[in-house]
Image: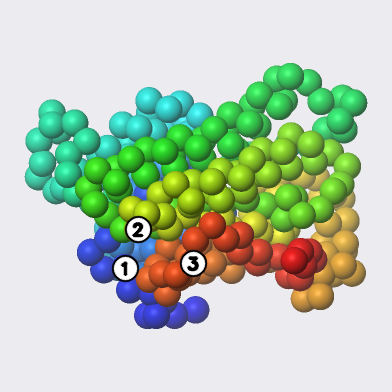
């Protein structure tokens, strides 16, 4: 799909979860639209594969191997991304260049409510909520300090609109992301900063296809029957939603949840 309607030339984007799936697709689309892209992930091999792909296409990308649940690591990487080229690294956060934050990193977990352990909830919440919270906080602080009318895009999930066995940890964390998105939008809107979430349906990514073949086949069959579009989605389809919300095409959109889910859920 063409990205000419979304010109991000001269802008700096930071993408978490950029080593694969929706994060990688979003980073690549940002670069194709002209942005300098800072890619973050704990999967170093996948992370460098993403930045190499961007560079092969003529784009500009930087890799930041980190764990999003570690606030210090994430804060340092965002400060680096926001620092103008050639600035003295000893000056701290510097002044300049963070226009877009796409907080996409996440993990999948499934367990019945009665079998969910504290460590399960803590691990999923640390990555799927706190990792997004930390990214949003630091991005917003940087944008406010620099007077940047930026865009923050968070990754929610169709799980916030549906119930289902095993969704406690994942669904609770993603519901918290929705509340974070709406609350932050009200707080930073006066600074010209927009905050929106994308809540995908079932998307064919490395995270979702790690399940056994039988479970994947069941999901494919279920989506064929339940979703009006009759299929699962692809990472690029969600990345285009992220790109839209990050760009000036969504300049009057904030506090919203965009649901590219094949029609499997249609909340008011």
Query: In the rendered image, which residue does mark 1 sit on?
Result: 8
Q: Residue furthest top?
A: 118
Examine the image and state in which quarter residue 12 appears.
bottom left
Q: Is residue 157 visible?
A: yes
Query: In the rendered image, which residue does mark 3 sit on?
Result: 253
Viewer-nearest of labels 2 and 1?
2
Check the picture and name the quadrant holding the C terminus: bottom right
How far apart marks 1 and 3 lie (CA) works out to: 17 Å
How far apart marks 2 and 1 lie (CA) works out to: 17 Å
Of callouts 2 and 3, which one flags the residue occurring earlier in the amino acid sequence? 2
Local secondary structure at mark 3: loop
Local secondary structure at mark 1: loop
Of callouts 2 and 1, which one flags the residue occurring earlier in the amino acid sequence? 1
Label ID, residue 192? 2
Q: Say which residue appears at 86% left-offset and 47% top-offset.
A: 164
State the scheme by which the image is colored: rainbow
Residue 169 lies, in percent from the top left, at 74, 34
Quick check: marks 2 and 1 in contact, CB under 8 Å? no
Residue 79 lies, in percent from the top left, at 27, 37
Taking depth in this image into account, of 51 and 1 the one nearest to the observer is 1
Compared with 232, 208 (above or below) is: above
């Amino acid at each position: 799909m063409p990205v000419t309607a979304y010109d991000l030339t001269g802008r700096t984007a930071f993408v978490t979860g950029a080593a694969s799936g929706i994060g990688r697709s979003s980073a690549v689309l940002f670069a194709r639209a002209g942005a300098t892209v800072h890619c973050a992930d704990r999967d170093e091999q996948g992370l460098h594969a993403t930045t190499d792909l961007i560079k092969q296409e003529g784009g500009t990308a930087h890799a930041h191997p980190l764990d999003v649940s570690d606030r210090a690591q994430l804060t340092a990487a965002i400060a680096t991304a926001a620092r103008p080229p050639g600035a003295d690294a000893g000056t701290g956060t510097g002044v300049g260049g963070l226009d877009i934050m796409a907080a996409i990193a996440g993990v999948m977990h499934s367990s019945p409510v009665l079998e969910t352990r504290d460590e399960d909830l803590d691990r999923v919440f640390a990555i799927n909520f706190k990792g997004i919270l930390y990214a949003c906080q630091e991005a917003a602080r940087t944008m406010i300090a620099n007077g940047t009318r930026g865009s923050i895009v968070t990754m929610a999930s169709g799980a916030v609109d549906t119930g289902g066995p095993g969704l406690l940890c994942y669904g609770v964390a993603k519901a918290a992301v929705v509340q974070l998105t709406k609350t932050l939008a009200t707080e930073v809107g006066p600074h010209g900063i927009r905050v929106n979430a994308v809540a995908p349906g079932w998307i064919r990514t490395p995270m979702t296809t790690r399940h056994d073949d039988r479970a994947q086949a069941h999901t494919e069959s279920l989506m064929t029957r339940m979703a009006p579009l009759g299929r699962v989605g692809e990472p690029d389809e969600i990345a285009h939603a992220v790109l839209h919300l990050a760009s000036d095409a969504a300049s009057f959109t904030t506090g919203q949840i965009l649901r590219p889910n094949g029609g499997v859920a249609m909340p008011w």
